[in-house]
Image (tube, grey):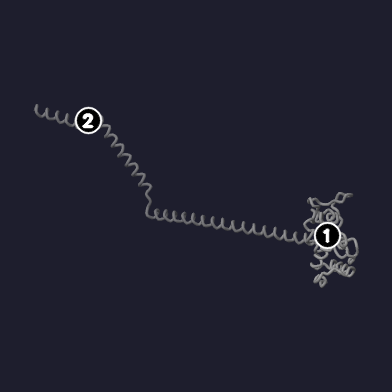
Amino acid sequence: MADDTQTQTTTQQTTTADTGKDATYWQAEARKAFEARDEAKRLAKELAAKTLSDEDAELFKKLREAEAKTEEERKRKAGEFDSWRKDILTKHQQEIADREKRIADAEGKTRKTLIGLAFAGATDIFGKDALTIYGPKAGERIFSEFVDLDEDGSVVVKNRAGHVILDADTGKPASFAVALKELIESLPDKNDHLRGSGKTGSGSAGGGQPGSPADITDLTTRARSGDKDAIKALQARRANSGALVMGSAFSQR
């Protein structure tokens, strides 16, 4: 009997020594195990309640597929809308550019027409026996850089500084002929543009003294370019002097 007691005591001591834990510890561990088991049962019940039948699972699958298809369709429609909006914007911008170009072209034609009419109407300045040696079209080519349209569409002439030439009495833009004459008179090379004071054929056809080398050179240059007035002036000089020879210039009419 003593041996059995001793053996049991030894076994308990060995178990306690092997585990290093007392009864309180094991009681706490057992309680935790029961709590974990109960929690597992509870979760199992919740999962069972949430588990779908085969029919419900199939319906759920179809709903998910429909949702994905709807989203894909939405994205496609959004892309088409963005593309449509971009096309509309591009088309609108092109229409604006085309309209602005048509307006600019129309304004350019109107400007050219009005300015051309102004030069054609200035017969005291351009034409036969006029102030200058040019016809209307030639005068327009030479002096157009000084001519513009005012805000109200009227033709105005600007001086060399770019300011509109005004009527001293009214303070408004001077008439085309008056303003252009004032402009020409202000040019440093005005004598190259003005017709001589004498009649055509008298030998005076621009700047320089009649009969001077400069005058003859100017007449010769103009005659070779086809200026009929210069040709007549040179012919008159030749007839008077009998010494001036111009060659082919006199064959131009």
Give the foreground label among 1 and 2: 1
* Image quadrant occupied by the N terminus: top left
Q: How many marks?
A: 2
Residue drawn at x 32%, y 41% as measured from the top left: 40
Residue position marked by numbered label 1 in the rendering: 193
| Label placed on residue 167 | none
Instruction: Name the residue nearer the viewer: 50 or 240.
Output: 240
Residue drawn at x 37%, y 46% as measured from the top left: 49
Q: Residue furthest top?
A: 2
* Image quadrant occupied by the C terminus: bottom right
219 with respect to 30 (left or right): right
- Tag 1: residue type? His
Q: Residue furthest bottom?
A: 251
204 with respect to 59 (left or right): right
- Image quadrant assignment for residue 105: bottom right
Residue drawn at x 87%, y 51% as measured from the top left: 167
List x then y, in percent, for residue 169. 89, 49
89 with respect to 247 (left or right): left
List x then y, in percent, for residue 194. 85, 59
| Label placed on residue 20 | 2
The crowd level at tag 2 (other Cα within 10 Å; few <14, some 14-19, many 20+) is few
- Image quadrant assignment for residue 134: bottom right
Q: In the figure, 189 relative to 21: above or below?
A: below
Instruction: Name the residue nearer the viewer: 114 or 207.
Output: 207
Q: CA distance from mark 1 to mark 2?
A: 128 Å
List x then y, in percent, for residue 215. 84, 62
Residue 122 visible, this angle: no
- Tag 2: residue type? Gly
